[in-house]
Amino acid sequence: MQFSFRLPVATHILLCIERFKDEYKTTSTFLASSVNVNPVIIRKTLGQLKAAGLVEVAAGVGGAKLTKSPEDITLWDVFRAVEEDEDLFHFQENPNPKCPVGRNIHGVLGDRLEEVRQHMLADFKKVTLADLLESIATKEAAE
Amino acid sequence: MQFSFRLPVATHILLCIERFKDEYKTTSTFLASSVNVNPVIIRKTLGQLKAAGLVEVAAGVGGAKLTKSPEDITLWDVFRAVEEDEDLFHFQENPNPKCPVGRNIHGVLGDRLEEVRQHMLADFKKVTLADLLESIATKEAAE
DNA sequence: ATTGATGTAATATAATATGTTACAACTATT
DNA sequence: AATAGTTGTAACATATTATATTACATCAAT
């Protein structure tokens, strides 16, 4: 059981937009060829990133660019843009209310899991696009 | 996008086994009525918990019990018993190798996400079944 | 032997993610 | 104004995974 690849794809898109901003017009087709998914997936994701205020997309003429500098965009921003703000785990909806475990498990376990989730989100905040771009540049230099 | 309810269900099962060990024989049917899922789901989950060494299941006669005390079983044990040991997120399998972002994203972003996952696992280790049982007992007392 | 359980296979159903096609709307350019 | 390339989005198809259910062989205490 894993999270979908929406976060990785969205991050990939943002990194490409920044990395190639001076070389290419970063259209959905261009981005799709780097990520290797259908351009429509890119457009949908770009729509979520736009709604979250992370990118601007040029209507008509095409191409996208970041609205902030890469230092100011974290994985937390990206995660929130493309994933629902919901519990980390599904819970069985109708446990037995006559059982003391059944009627309290969601509250008790849910609280602990929500703490874990908040830590995860805090971790996401520590990673910026700039960090990732730098790591990629380092790898590129070593090739 | 959420994790399945395998962890919550498995935890629920373990808590019930301990909570009712002196009152009932904790068969898959009994447990199923508290969790409110099909008994076969309970048996499969119990099979995973048994494989992980967390419970013993009485063949033939039925019923399950913990192999350790609740202080010594954490959510980490339960998570490992019922979930694959894999990346937190899916990655697009074939990004464009001709693109510097495409050929490095998995390594670079994957490393950061693996750190987040390790933190999550560490958080799971902090929560024991005994903690949860105590929280439930507190709620029961307040009812 | 009977009874009530477990373990497991086979299959069905549901939910979700992803892929694809199609097309209206938009904007710079000619 | 017409064109060309692009975005935004709907509609639909496909794949994957999780969960539910039925069935039944096997087991062990009575």
Image (spheres, coloured by chain):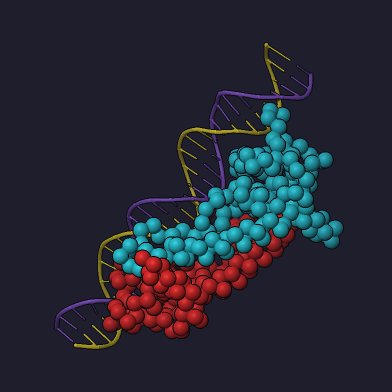
Chain colours: A cyan, B red, C purple, D yellow
The answer to whether residue C15 is left or right of residue A8 is left
Q: Which residue is drawn at 36% across and 65% down?
A: B143
Where, by quadrant of the figure, is residue C29 drawn?
top right
Q: At which x and y percent is residue B29? A: 29, 70
Q: With B58 as the anchor, is A121 left or right in this view?
A: right
Q: Is residue A1 visible?
A: no
In the image, residue B77 sits, relative to residue A54, either above or below, namely below
Query: Does any portion of residue A48 appear in the rendered image?
Result: yes
Q: How many labels does the image show?
A: 0
Query: Image quadrant of residue C4?
Result: bottom left
Query: Could you tell me residue B106's position as x and y percent?
Result: 69, 58
Determine which quarter of the picture holds residue A126.
bottom right
Q: Locate the C terminus of chain A by quadrant.
A: bottom right
Which residue: 70% across, 52% down?
A: A74
In percent of the image, x 43 and y 84: which residue is there?
B67
List the single residue furthest toward the right.
Answer: A141
Residue A31: percent from the left, percent from the top? 70, 43
Q: Is residue A130 above or below residue D4?
A: below
Q: Residue furthest front?
A: B142
Residue shown at 60%/47% (left/top)?
A82
Judge by depth and name the residue closer to the eye, B99 or C5.
C5
Left or right of residue B112: residue C13: left
The x and y percentages for residue A37 are 62, 46
Along the viewing direction, whichever of D26 and A20 lies nearer the viewer: A20
